[in-house]
Image (cartoon, rainbow, N blue to C red):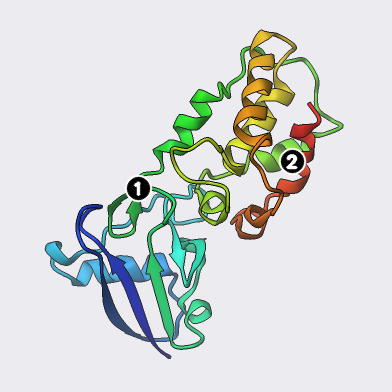
């Protein structure tokens, strides 16, 4: 199969973006991440496409980008699936400040969790046998930002924390013992998430881990 792959490139947020097109011919059994690696090995250092990767096994979320208009992990999308119509487009996330090419600054995800004081002061003594499965699923969040990219209410640096923070808030609030810190987390959760969420659940549809975000949110809202 032959696929035209268009990559949106930009040397920095102040520079003018442009589209660079590549032609791929093969069986399509490469992931987008594999293809980016191969292209960069063939190109000169000055032309290398800037993108982020870590595990390349759908476990870290570093390679998140917009593929054919859809927030995805590059390591989980195969060319033969994305390029069925003969074309693939790769773009950086639009909701976060651009660094270069397909790399954006997602530090706001972690800064927001700090502001919401999402950590445990003291874990309570429950064995969570009644809710262990949901706690385990929530722990699989990659903090990749796909949910935030598609969310109609999220914009980096603004008031709404988004689903990624909601998941971590749920885990910390439910596992933390009854104390002043738990009350602070609940207050921040209401201010930074509950009061903004429009219940579209577009976040759930794009989550690479297929987390049951609606169920997790219902549990978090119940505290």
Q: Residues within 10 Å of mark 1 (few under 14, many from 20)?
A: some
**Residue 21: x and y, percent?**
28, 79
In three-dimensional space, the C-alpha distance between marks 1 and 2, rounded to whole angstroms, equals 28 Å
Horizontally, residue 98 falls left or right of residue 183, namely: left
Query: Eyeballing the image, is 133 above or below 65?
Result: above
Give the number of the mark in front: 1 or 2.
1
Give the number of marks.
Answer: 2
Q: Give the residue displayed 37% in from the left and 53% down from the top.
A: 53
Q: Residue furthest bottom?
A: 1
Q: Give the residue displayed 38% in from the left and 65% down from the top.
A: 91
Q: Give the residue displayed 44% in from the left and 70% down from the top.
A: 31
For the residue pair 55 and 61, the one nearer the viewer reads as 61
> Which residue corresponds to mark 1?
97
Q: Give the residue displayed 44% in from the left and 56% down from the top.
A: 56
Q: Residue furthest top?
A: 180
Query: Eyeballing the image, is 9 above or below 144?
Result: below
Q: Say if mark 1 contacts mark 2, CB within 8 Å.
A: no
**Residue 1: x and y, percent?**
43, 91
Residue 25's quadrant in the figure?
Answer: bottom left
Residue 18 is tagged as none
Q: Residues within 10 Å of mark 2 (few under 14, many from 20)?
A: many
**Residue 32: x and y, percent?**
42, 69
**Residue 82: x and y, percent?**
50, 77
Residue 28's quadrant in the figure?
Answer: bottom left
Secondary structure under the numbered disc 1 in the rendered image: loop
> Which residue corresponds to mark 2?
216
Secondary structure under the numbered disc 2 in the rendered image: helix
């Amino acid at each position: 199969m032959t696929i035209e792959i268009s990559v949106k490139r930009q040397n920095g947020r102040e520079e003018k973006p442009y589209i660079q097109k590549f032609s791929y011919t093969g069986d399509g059994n490469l992931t987008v991440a594999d293809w980016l690696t191969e292209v960069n090995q063939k190109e000169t250092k000055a032309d290398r496409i800037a993108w982020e990767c870590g595990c390349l096994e759908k476990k870290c979320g570093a390679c998140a980008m917009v593929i054919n208009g859809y927030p995805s992990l590059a390591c989980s999308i195969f060319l033969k699936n994305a390029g069925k119509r003969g074309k693939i487009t790769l773009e950086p996330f639009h909701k976060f400040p651009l660094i270069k090419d397909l790399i954006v600054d997602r530090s706001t995800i972690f800064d927001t969790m700090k502001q919401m004081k999402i950590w445990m002061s003291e874990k309570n003594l429950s064995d969570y046998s009644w809710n262990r499965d949901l706690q385990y699923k929530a722990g699989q969040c990659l903090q990749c930002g796909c949910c935030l990219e598609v969310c109609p209410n999220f914009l980096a640096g603004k008031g709404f924390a988004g689903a990624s923070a909601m998941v971590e808030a749920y885990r910390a609030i439910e596992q933390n013992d009854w104390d002043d810190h738990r009350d602070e987390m609940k207050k921040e959760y209401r201010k930074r998430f509950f009061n903004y969420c429009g219940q579209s659940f577009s976040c759930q549809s794009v989550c690479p881990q297929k987390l049951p975000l609606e169920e997790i949110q219902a549990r978090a809202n119940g505290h």
